[in-house]
Image (cartoon, grey):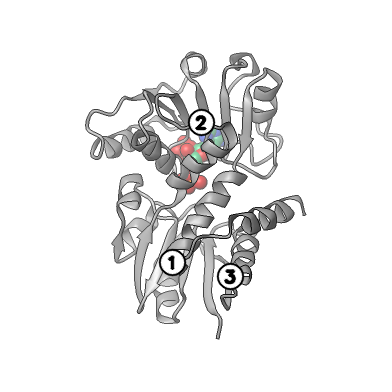
Amino acid sequence: MPIRFGVLGHPVAHSLSPQMQEAAFAHEKISARYGRFEIPPDELRDALRLMGELGFGGANLTVPHKVAALDLVESTDANARRAGAVNTVIFDNGKSRGFNTDGTGFSRAIAEEFDRGLRDLQVLVLGAGGAARAIAAQCLEDGVSHLAVWNRTAARALEMRAQLLGYYETAPIEIIESTPDALSASVARADLIINATSVGLRSDDPPLISRAAFTNRHFVYDTIYRPSRTRLLEEAAAAGAATANGLSMLLHQGAAAFTLWTSRPAPLDVMRDALRRAASA
Ligand code: ATR
């Protein structure tokens, strides 16, 4: 029987992970199937337990399960603990081990898209959910000079800051007030701006940052990849900023997950081609 894998989300129908991972397994001649599983939050615990019992090889977690999964797996690696979120699980004789590849995936995506590392950048992260946490932790790991976090619900941003300070005691983390003026001032100071909220998933979502705030020295990364260009990216690009969407982060987090499951280097070009095909379908 093929080794079974899957992504658990709510909603999950639009996940492109199956196309990307099945292309990688086929290329490596590994007999495996990777499915999508629509799992509401109150079923996540049972779903993970059942997958272990049924002999699944591993899983990915997406919205809204990444933070909750931290307490539902039997062990976690340092990346998952630092981010406070799990996006990849290995089932090992029925036992679940949690990892987080979003941070390293993000770091590789920035290097690939903008041809530079995170070190010494002034970074502004929008959001305080699972994706934002992994990105923020990676920014500190890679030595950004300043990390500003803006979130609609300020309390969640403060909670994220407290968690990160547990790992990076002297980290330069600033929480931006949830007002438009405070956000614009913070955009003016930033080199790299990352949207890790779900704003922009719908094409009529008004962007969180006003068009006038962008300049041609900004780098703007949107973790959203469908639509392929959110209004945030369009407006930033119109101001001359360098922009990129979240397909590269999806690719690199998926490649790192593939390596965790198989102990093999991921066939990156095969996975990238499969993703591009699926994203434009
Ligand atoms: P993920 O795991 O993908 O990060 P999540 O944990 O549900 O998903 O986080 C979604 C993020 O998008 C949060 O930062 C959320 O802000 P709140 O903490 O205030 O809920 C943000 N978000 C969702 N809808 C938003 C909106 N209409 N305006 C601003 N932020 C929004």
Binning the other alpha carbons within 10 Å of mark 2 as few (below 14), some (14 to 19) or many (20 upward) gives: few
- 185 and 120: which one is in front? 120
Q: Quadrant of the N terminus?
A: bottom right
Classify mark 3: helix, strand or loop: loop
Task: State left or right for residue 69 relative to residue 190.
Answer: left
Q: Position of residue 80 (x, y in %)?
A: 35, 52
Q: Earlier in the sequence, mark 1 or mark 2?
A: 2
**Residue 69 lies in what quarter of the image?**
bottom left
User: Is the CB of mark 3 within 8 Å of ligand 1?
Assistant: no
Classify mark 1: helix, strand or loop: loop
Position of 63 relative to 125 (above/below): below
Give me the residue at 44% from left, 42% from top: 129
User: Is the CB of mark 1 within 8 Å of ligand 1?
Assistant: no
Q: Amino acid at mark 2?
A: Arg
Binning the other alpha carbons within 10 Å of mark 3 as few (below 14), some (14 to 19) or many (20 upward) gives: some
Task: Evaluate whether residue 60 shows in this view.
Answer: no
Q: Residue furthest bottom?
A: 1
Disc 1 vs disc 2: Cβ atoms closer than 8 Å?
Answer: no
Task: State left or right for residue 38 relative to residue 166.
Answer: right
Q: Position of residue 76 (x, y in %)?
A: 31, 59
Q: Amino acid at mark 1?
A: Ser
Task: State left or right for residue 162 relative to residue 118.
Answer: left
Q: Which residue is mark 3?
A: 28
Q: Earlier in the sequence, mark 3 or mark 2?
A: 3
Position of 141 relative to 49 (above/below): above
Give me the residue at 34% from left, 64% from top: 73
Q: Position of residue 78 (x, y in %)?
A: 30, 51
**Residue 116 badge:** 2
